[in-house]
Image (cartoon, helix red, strand yellow):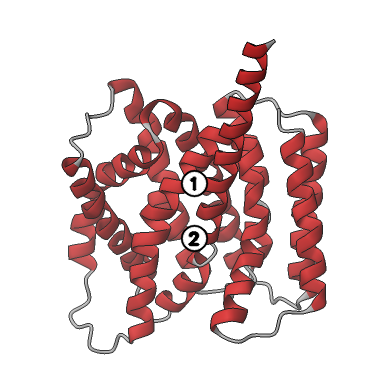
Amino acid sequence: MERTSKLHNQTLEKNTSGLINGLIGVVIFSGSLPATRVAVLEFDPVFLTVARATIAGVLALCILWLFEEKRPARNQLLPLVIVAMGVVVGFPLLTALALQYVTSAHSIVFVGMLPLATAAFGVLRGGERPRPAFWFFSVLGSLLVVGFAVSQGLTASPTGDILMLLAILACGLGYAEGAKLSKTLGGWQVISWALVLSLPIVAPLTWWLTPPSFSGISAPAWLSLAYVSLFSMLIGFVFWYRGLAQGGIAAVGQLQLLQPFFGLALAATLLHEQVSIGMLGVTVAVIMCVVGARRFAK
């Protein structure tokens, strides 16, 4: 009996830690699309993608060298390549391209679908089997986010929408694969090695695509590049993958439903934009969906 109680407490502590780490990751990621939107107005989207990956990759290489981390095993290389294709190159490139056609607000529609994509790939790649009620709360939460976004009077672009849909699929796969690998390799090690594996490709492309002059680039664009390179590309994933590995891909992945609202909250705080009563109401409803989804995730 005592042993069972101890195991229960350990599991509860692990799930709580996973929730906290995942939440920190979501807060960091919430600034990614607005920052990308600012940066892509002055940087070429392909250059922005490879430059942010190169900056983060060099930093990751230094961290791995500093802590004398062992190289990944041979059977871990393919999952790392999938992570790199999904979150190092795929999602940043596709969103940068999409944000040339749609606003960052419009992307809320698709970010609301990210938890479903992550959970689906978690089932396919991670072996997780959530209960039917989990899918009910997941779909309901996604519909609430999509409904709120549509109610804001968003303009549509077929090209931008297709690019965002592909970005969500790439990101969901990268999240699920990285979370599965984090259980054996470690959270920050997964994103670090994925970034390092990308360096032989993204570093030469960064040099090749570097514009002749940066004289016309404003300070907000530089700050946005710094944010997506350091926080969106590396620091956020340290917390995110650790959270997914501790609390489960399906359960912690539902925290992504809160990402659009964190982004709007940041806009209200930093840009003094008005936050409506409707937004607060939908946020509370989404939080309830997250709680319900986590309860039935396993």
Q: Which mark is residue 124?
A: none
Q: Residue furthest bottom?
A: 216
Name the residue: 25% across, 60% down. Answer: 55
Query: Could you tell me which secondary element the residue under label 2 belongs to?
Result: helix
- Left or right, residue 110 beside residue 39: right
Q: Are marks 1 and 2 in contact (CB under 8 Å)?
A: yes
Q: Which mark is residue 240?
A: 1
Give how far across and how far down residue 258 sits, in percent: 66, 58
Which residue is denoted by mark 2 in the rendering?
28
Residue 174 appears in the rendering: no
Query: Could you tell me which secondary element the residue under label 1 belongs to?
Result: helix
Q: Nearer the viewer, residue 287 or 5?
A: 5
Precedes in sequence: disc 1 or disc 2: 2
Q: Image quadrant of residue 103?
A: bottom right
Give how far across and how far down residue 84 sits, in percent: 37, 44
Label 1, label 2: how far apart the Cα atoms are: 9 Å
With respect to residue 88, does 218 lie above or below? below
Q: Quadrant of the N terminus?
A: top right
Name the residue: 57% across, 52% down. Answer: 23
Name the residue: 60% across, 55% down. Answer: 165
Name the residue: 61% across, 19% down. Answer: 7
Three-letter code for the amino acid on which mark 1 is drawn: Trp
Three-letter code for the amino acid on which mark 2 is drawn: Ile
Q: Image quadrant of residue 17?
A: top right
Q: Nearer the viewer, residue 8 or 129?
A: 8
